[in-house]
Amino acid sequence: MSLPRLVYYSAVIGGWAAFIGWFFSEMFLQSDSAGGSVQVALVGGLVGAAIGAGLNAVAGMANGQWKQLLMRTLPGLIGGGLGGALGGLAGNILFMVGVPRAFGWCLMGLGIGVVEGLYERSPGKIRNGLIGGGLGGLLGGMLFNPIMGLIGSASGMSSRATSFVILGMCIGVLIGLAQVVLKDAWLTVLDGYRAGRQLILSQPVTTLGRAEHLPLPFLGAMSQDLELEHARLTRQPNGSFALADNQTRLGTRLNGQPIQSTVVLKDGDVIKLGTNFIRFNERQRKAGAESAVPTTGFSGKVVAAPPPPPGSAKPSVSAKPTAPMRPVASAPPPPASDKVVSAAAPAPAPPRPSAPSPNLAPPRPPAPAGGALPPPPKMPAPPKPVAPPPPPSGGVQSIRPIIAPPPPPPPPRKP
């Protein structure tokens, strides 16, 4: 059952249940000798028990199994009966001293609204039921006496019947509205068995599967491969919900990917159980509900970072900001040596002369690393060569100049 239908059926069932409770009170309490407050308490107890049983059964209509619905009526009868009897008694006493009877019917609404939360052991539903039931009882009680005055009759049966029906509808619609408006998270069946059903996640652990006792069972031939208890949704301490597969053969998928461990759900995630697709939705939580990892930025201020995804390593936290690394400058090439080298071990490259000579060609620029030598630059024509001085004895000239050979000596003259 969808959530809008929950509100609608709560109003309809609440009104009809109040009518049935009024009918039995007219049958069995009309000739009752006890009058006054006792009789009003008994009437309130019967009407409250009927409303409580009907509304508690409506809350379990997402299950859709008659056995489960009938099991919920007994707690509703008890809680609604006690609340109705107490509200009727207190309301009649207050009415005698001049206080409006609406406060007594407000107590009836509180007693009816708390039943669903107690049955499911959900603090959230207890709170929502108290709010909706109290407001519904107060509103219905405020309309009770004016309706009785407008619809007058000799016996007063029609006016009482109308007033109790309005009271039941007000309690039902406001309890349903409170549960829907104040919900924290809910599931919606998108495709599969009885698509369109919705379930408010109010319990600490919600189990999904094929078992009939589950709040949202998946039955039928299309779900025959599911386990009785296939997957679990667990409420975390910070209010989020986590999904875990129950080690099933078929497995559970989240947004198309199979899950291997517990995964925290986000608003809009789609869970796949066999051929059933279920969407998870949640209300936006307050800032700071998520656990934060303190990290330090370059400004030196500590900021809160989002928690890492499950299964990933936690980021390292540095105490001080790390300065960016400076590029290391390459060392300059060593200057060429002017020393004389041995002839047996030739130098890999001609040494650079200490002083440039007009007879020598300029040295080539060094070759870039890993590349070919650049072409030599075009030089102007050298001047006339001049004979260099003879090299020293026993040594080897460090640099071999590029010069022209000297002219041959003139022939000796004959005497």
Image (cartoon, rainbow, N blue to C red):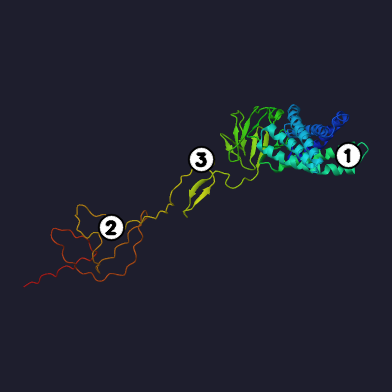
Q: Identify residue type, mark 2.
A: Pro
Task: Residue type at mark 3: give it.
Answer: Ser
Determine whether label 3 and label 1 are within 8 Å by CB. no
Locate residue 319 relative to residue 266 in the image: left or right: left
Picture quarter containing residue 407?
bottom left
Dot 3 or dot 1: first in sequence order is 1
Q: Residue at x 52, y 38 (%)?
A: 311
**Crowding at mark 2 (Cα within 10 Å: few <14, some 14-19, many 20+):** few
Which residue in the structure is indicated by mark 1?
159
Front tag of 3 and 2? 3
- Look at mark 2 in the image and give the residue it sits on: 334
Tell me, yes or no, whether the two marked residues, 2 and 1, touch with CB atoms within 8 Å: no
Image quarter hosting the C terminus? bottom left
Instruction: Name the residue nearer the viewer: 43 or 190.
Output: 43
Marks 3 and 1 sit apart, C-alpha to C-alpha, by 68 Å
Residue 86 in the image, given as x and y percentages of width and height: 76, 34
Q: CA distance from mark 3 to mark 2?
A: 50 Å
Which residue position holds label 3? 312
Residue placed furthest toward the left: 415
Under circle 3, the secondary element is loop
